[in-house]
Image: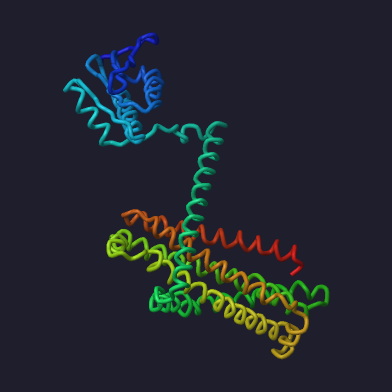
Amino acid sequence: MERHPASSDEVLIEIGEEEDGVVAKARGHWVVAAAGELDRKLRALERGEKRVTFELRDVGALDSAGAWLLVRTRRRLEQKGRAVDVRNLRPELEPLIRQVEVSDVGELKPNLGELRDTATGVVASVGEASVRLFWKGYSLLAFFGVVCVAAARTIRHPSRLRFTAMVHHMEDTGVDAMGIVGLLSFLIGIVFAYQGADQLRRFGAEIYTVNLLGISMLRELGVLMTAIILAGRSGSAFTAQIGTMKVNEEIDAMQVLGLDPIEVLVLPRLFALLITLPLLAFFANVLGLFGGAVMSYLTLDLTLPGFLRQLRYFMPGWSFWVGVMKAPVFAAVIALIGCYEGLRTERSAESVGRLTTLSVVEAIFLVIVIDAAFSILFSKLGI
């Protein structure tokens, strides 16, 4: 294989002026050995506003690195609105230029896999993840703003709301989820009552099992477990449904017909979850307390009237409302994440599965983070 060395003092580009712009006369070997010098000189061409003409008659050799630098510079100049012309490229070099243009390799990036065991690799990985996280948050915030505008428009003109679709999603996210939510809440109530009674018996304070169960279920566990179940059940369904529509080009057809995907697909799901999640959380609280009452009767011989009396007289008044206030926020987060990831789906089945999994993880993570923030806020407020 013939090698084309490039000396460090070889002038690979001469930049001159013409009446209608700048002329970059290329010469020598545009190969990987000279890529650094070529890159510096081509970047200098990006400054300015004039037309740029590449005169390539005197290029002796060209490999993929030189071709990529030429294609990249031409694209950057065209993106800035500057006219670009390529003259006198030898016919035997044209296929390589066309191949690089078709491949669309983009910018070169460092291989983090090779650097992962070094300090530079760790810093690069953290930086890359931080940038991705920042842009993800920015994109989510922008999507939230678009949804708020559409929701305000719908509230001003209620006839725009697709009521039938909303009722369908209420049935799907609410009625159909009652079985799994009720069963898990009932079992959690049994476990908490049993464990609480077992621990408090050592201090002769078994009666306070009712207080422990009530505070745990009403303030935290009831609404949190309901939100996590719906994030895995309904949030993933939102992503899969909208993602499948994206793959089948149904959303494109919807936009061609003049319909807003936010109004048609997002708002019915959002409003449905805003209604059903608080109701399901209340249902979970009732089933959880009932499970605790059953276990209290079996382990403490505490009758149901005695359980309710203890719960009524010794429970803080805000405990129930604290859980209720969290429910709409959790519902909005789950619905927005599910719909956002669904609209981001690419036209492939693999993308649907990947983003469905991602939406569940993101929704559960944000629900727990927001729950922690609520706990800190209520603690500061003395609630």
The answer to whether residue 256 is above or below residue 116 is below
The residue lying at 69 percent from left, 89 percent from top is: 304
Quarter of the figure with residue 13: top left
Instruction: Report the coloring of the rendering.
Output: rainbow
Quarter of the figure with residue 294: bottom right
Farthest residue to the left: give it: 91
Side (left or right) of 326 relative to 358: right
Q: Between residues 223 and 91, which one lies in front from this camera angle?
A: 91
Q: Quadrant of the C terminus?
A: bottom right
The residue lying at 64 percent from left, 77 percent from top is: 189
Farthest residue to the front: give it: 19
The answer to whether residue 220 is above or below residue 37 is below
Residue 13 appears in the picture as rendered: no
Q: Position of residue 24 (x, y in %)?
A: 31, 19
Q: Position of residue 258 (x, y in %)?
A: 31, 64
The answer to whether residue 177 is above or below residue 120 is below
Q: Position of residue 12 (x, y in %)?
A: 33, 14
The answer to whether residue 112 is above or below residue 32 is below
Residue 317 appears in the picture as rendered: yes
Count all numbered tags in the image, as a single digit. Answer: 0
Q: Between residues 206 and 49, which one lies in front from this camera angle?
A: 49
Q: Quadrant of the N terminus?
A: top left
The residue lying at 45 percent from left, 77 percent from top is: 170
Q: Position of residue 326 (x, y in %)?
A: 61, 69
